[in-house]
Structure formats: C-alpha cells, structure tokens
Amino acid sequence: MKMELYSDAYYISRIKEGDAECFGCLLDRYSRRIFALIVRIVENREDAEEITQDVFLKVFKTLASFKAECSFSTWIYRIAWNTAVSETRRKKDNFLPLEENLTSDDAPESSLFSDDDDAEKHHRQLELLDKALTQLPADERAMILLFYKDEKTIEELAIITGLTEANVKVKLFRIRKRLSVLIRNMEEKDNE
Amino acid sequence: MNNNEINNERWKDLFSQLPEEKPSELFRSHMMEKIRREAACAHRRNERMAWAAVSFASVVLIVIAVATFIFMKTPKITIDFPSFALLRFSTLPLYLFIGAIALFLLILDNQIRKNYRKRHSS
C-alpha cells in the first residue's frame, strides 16, 4: 500500500503519536532518492541497501528530536550524509588523489560542453562523468551529487554537511574543476 | 546569463541524466518490518520506564511517610482496624457489592486497553 497524500509534518506528528505505519509514507517519499545517493557514495548496491536501512532506522529512532529547524528532507539527507560518508571513511576509501596542478584554471569548464546536438558525444560525456565521479573522494562525490542531482541549495548543503556556506561554495567550485580535469584527461586518452 | 550560470545549467543537465539505481523490491517490506520491531521495543521500553518511575515515586512516598511517622511523630493518629467480627451481617452485601463493582471496572479497563492497543498496532 502506497500513500502520499499529506505533508511530512503530518506523518511525523502521527509517528510521534505512536502510529509507526505512517513511516511507510515517508519511506515511499524518500527511500529512492536517499538510496540513489548512497549507492553513488559507497559504490556497492548491497552496502548501500544496508546503509539506507540504517539511515531510516536512525530517522525513526531520533524522530522525537526533530525540531523542524530545517526541513525534514534536509534533516534526512544530513543523516544519510553522516552515515554514508563515515562508513566510507571507516572502510578507508582509497581514491587516487589529483595533483594540485591538475586542478588549476587551465581546464575551462565551458570547453567540456559541446553546443551541437551530437547524441553520441553526449552519451559519451555521460559515461565519462559517471567514471569521473567514481574517482572523487566519497564526501566530494556526495556534495556534487546533492547540488546538481538532488538540487539542494547552498544553504541546505551547509546544513547537511556541517560546513559554512562559503566553504560549500569553494568546495563545489573545486570539485567541478576536478571533474572537468578528470573528464578531459579521459577524453584525451580516448583520442590517443 | 553569465558563463558561470550557463556552465551550472549544463552540469545540472548532465547530472540529471545520470542513471539512477533503485532499491530492491523487498526493501520497503524489510524496512517496515524493522520499524515495527523497533516500535514494539520502544513501546516496551517506555512501559518499563513508566513502571520504574511509578515504583520509584511510590518508594519515595512510602519512605517520606514512614520518616514522617517515625521522626516527626506526626500526625498523631491511631488506626483502628475494623474487626470482621464487629461487622454487622447486614452490611456485608454492601461491601461485597462495592468489591464486585471495583473488580468489574478493573477488568473492563483492562479489556478496553487491550482493544485500544490492538487497534493501534494493526
């Protein structure tokens, strides 16, 4: 049974009153998005499913402490971020660090995107982005996905990650640069 | 739109087309099973806490009462326990009637609570 009729606040108040079944509605609303994010962070379906379950169990257990200082969506993403990123740190995420000189301004982002409607090139770009994402550290991957895929604002990202808004902006800029360099390098390798 | 905004839009467009993984079909049912178990645990925990609080409060009250009787010798009252021998036979049905009502109400209360819990847990 899937019901998505009322606001998050309504379901939260019902759950706080003891109606645990209402949690199913919050699951229907958020589980897919949270799972999609976590699977990208941990890069393993089984682990992602387990971590997503942990996230929702934490949400259920700590729901009484949710004071609506931010939206429920931001709160749940914050729990997902903390759980998934700390899990990858625990497992010692081994990524290849990019050299500083690779992240310099010599890779203008605009040249990455072609204006022509070449479907094949576009498809290739998607593939490269997918690959480039796997080469980023988990927290950076999560941050860029939250911003572009889940369309979170800088303010929301600051709440989710616990960083200041200025730090979030700087980090996003650097991550974008890193992605540009990674994609360009892969494109160059392809052309060789 | 400046260059930065155009690039932002292009990144957003590219990210929105990334393939998205979905949780397994059984994810929801497994999750809800865990939630129900956790809810039952929390209910039992709350009940235990309530019992502990009531027991603690009762013990505190009894200790205070005993201390008051022993150390402050107040109130100076004597308790005359009624002797059943003194009860007149005509008043016995009245006591039995009151006792039966109390018992009936206790059972009724218990039954209503059971029904309420059943309705709200299903």
Image: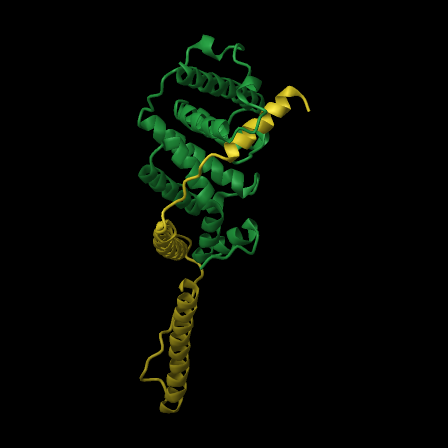
Chain colours: A green, B yellow
Q: Quadrant of residue B97?
A: bottom left
Would you place residue A68 above or below residue A134 in this image? below
Residue A181 appears in the picture as rendered: yes
Residue located 39% across and 55% down the image: B50
Residue located 33% across and 41% down the image: A50
Label total for image: 0
Residue A44: x and y in percent read 33, 35
Front residue of A68/B105: it is A68
Residue A14: x and y in percent read 51, 56
Q: Quadrant of residue B62?
A: bottom left
Residue A177: x and y in percent read 51, 17
Residue A159 appears in the picture as rendered: no
Front residue of B47/B65: it is B47
Residue located 39% across and 83% down the image: B95
User: In the picture, which quadrant includes the N terminus of chain B?
Assistant: top right
User: In the picture, which quadrant includes the C terminus of chain B?
Assistant: bottom left
Residue A155: x and y in percent read 59, 30
Farthest residue to the top: give it. A101
Front residue of A50/A33: it is A33
Front residue of A180/B36: it is A180
Would you place residue A87 above or below residue A46 in this image? above
Farthest residue to the bottom: give it. B90
Farthest residue to the right: give it. B1
Would you place residue A179 above or below residue A12 in this image? above
Left/right placement of residue A158 relative to residue A49 reads right
